Amino acid sequence: FFSAAISAMKIPAAAAFALLLALALPSGRASATPRVQLEPGSYTTGQWKRMHRAPKDAKLELFFMVKQSNLEKLEALFHMVSDPKNMHYGKHLANEEVHSLVAPEPRSLEIIRNFLAAHDLVGIPKTPNSDIISVEVTIEQAEKLLAAEYHSHAHPDTNHVAMRTPKYSLPAEVASVVDLIAPTTSLPPVTRPFVYTGQSRLDLKQLGVSAKKLRSLYSVDDFVGSATGNRHAVTGFLKQHFHPADLKEFWTLEMGGVKAKCPSVKKVGDGVGGLMAGVEAELDIEYINALGSGIESEFWGFSGNSPDNPQNEPFLKWLQVVSNTSDAEVPLIFSTSYGEPETTTTIETATRTNVEFQKAGVRGISLLFASGDSGAGCAGDKFVPNWPAGSPYVTGVGGTTGVPERAVGLASGGFCNRWPRQKWQEDAVQAYLNGAESIPDEKYYNKSGRGFPDIGAQATDFLVVSNLIPTPGVAGTSCASPTASGVMALLNDVRLAAGKSSLGFLNYFIYQNMDSFNDITEGANSGCEEGGFPAAKGWDPVTGVGTPNFAKLKDAVLKLP
């Protein structure tokens, strides 16, 4: 039939052969399905060293981050429930309502399901509305699925190995219904607090900080939490393990006189256990409890490569678990010391992550991030803002040192290039740009960008117990974030005890109550040739609006609806 039809059309012999061949092949082989590259140009190794091709039988847990619905409405609700001046303040959504609001289109899920089925794979919904779909694959399967080439990457200062690909693509129809897939092109940052050796415990008592000093400095004194349902958490990534024995030893050394027992910390995630504890993990859990005493405490750990589990993207894994945890069980405060230069995260990943932050905030969950330890940052003649502390949907925590407090040079801060200045900080940031002295030349930064951090806390000379060894001289905004988070958790406690809602996204409240913070006006962070940003009256890009004054903040939160 085909031969007769071709003959009747008088097609040349060569063309006729090609047409017959095409008709004889299965439809999927006749012409390749058009593919679209996702996150193009995003791959960079940074501190990692690219090595050999990843073993074909190694396993990955791929996350399909499915496009969501009603994102403009989600953001509108986020601002309404977070602004104390709005009549809807504190009227947070239930998790079920959030998932219903942003649920993907059914057709999107069908497209992904069919795509995976064509590769003999079955996806597993990881959230109630299936906006994150997981599939466990071998490297060989992932490479076929994504038209990718995965390589092993080693971090020179640790024993971390991550499998990533320089690029990946999807059939156009599938690409149209996902924001991104991970792990693919992005390598995780490996953040560590500074540890200055050579200081004795005596030096620390004289010059440094201790749990009791911090409680006094921030007017917490003998206050401890007691409200039912209040809980705080810290996060740990890339084999940052927590040992309960270390917290117990810390409690003995530092918490004498505080009328709160050493907490029994709940562990959540796939990276909570390990032979050796990490200084970062112990720092976080010890100091959020030192300030936020009496409150249920949790350690959320995601290694990205835990034994007997496929390798995954640990930061997105954390957000997925938050999204999948009920309102009755989810912590109301998370402190995270994860961070990296803004440009090392793809705009696709950052944009989707911002949505996940909003989903948490609209539920009444507060997210605090260390601003980083690179000062204003310097690459050529430009400052380098950090992420996620610069996200408009989280609270960035900068650093101070000494008593009286002054801005510490290592503390990151500045102005984002991706996100504009936010309405809740407009007046405070403009006042800094108009009135502060010795501000760096505008050529270094985007003065119209979101200014960060939002608040500060002590960031030097911390004592941390790790593997039962007290280590003095620990520094970095990794110290500041759990310290500030502990105070904020106490403020939640005050509100819950009074029958009020949790604080949720903090920044509206922070900038509307700047006089309830200890204003830091001395010091500066490091920068390029002309130096970084100076501290100044009001907000500044090193310490935010200042460090917490619990006594004043307690009164302020009780006045809120």
Image: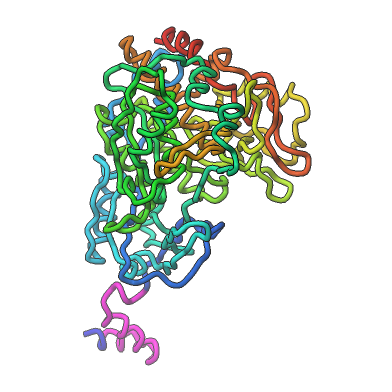
Q: How far across and how far down the image is residue 344, in percent?
A: 54, 51
Q: How far across and how far down the image is residue 499, in percent?
A: 30, 11
Quarter of the N terminus within the rendering? bottom left
User: Which residue is found at the position 32% from the left and 23% from the top?
Assistant: 261
Drawn side of residue 237 relative to residue 270, left or right: right
Q: Quadrant of residue 201?
A: top right
Q: How far across and how far down the image is residue 243, in percent?
A: 35, 41
Q: How is the image coloured?
A: rainbow
User: Which residue is found at the position 37% from the left and 62% from the top?
Assistant: 171
Q: Is residue 113 above or below residue 449?
A: below
Q: How far across and how far down the image is residue 189, in percent?
A: 50, 50
Where are the magenta residues, as a range?
5-31
Quarter of the C terminus within the rendering? top left
Q: Is the stretch drawn in magenta largely helix, strand or loop?
A: helix
Residue 328 is a magenta residue: no
Drawn side of residue 43 relative to residue 537, left or right: left
Q: Nearer the viewer, residue 348 or 554?
A: 554
Q: Nearer the viewer, residue 429 or 193?
A: 193
Is residue 360 something that shows in the picture?
A: yes
Q: Nearer the viewer, residue 191 or 249?
A: 249
User: Which residue is found at the position 25% from the left and 52% from the top?
Assistant: 110
Q: Quadrant of residue 445?
A: top right
Q: Is residue 39 above or below residue 85?
A: below
Is residue 390 something that shows in the picture?
A: no
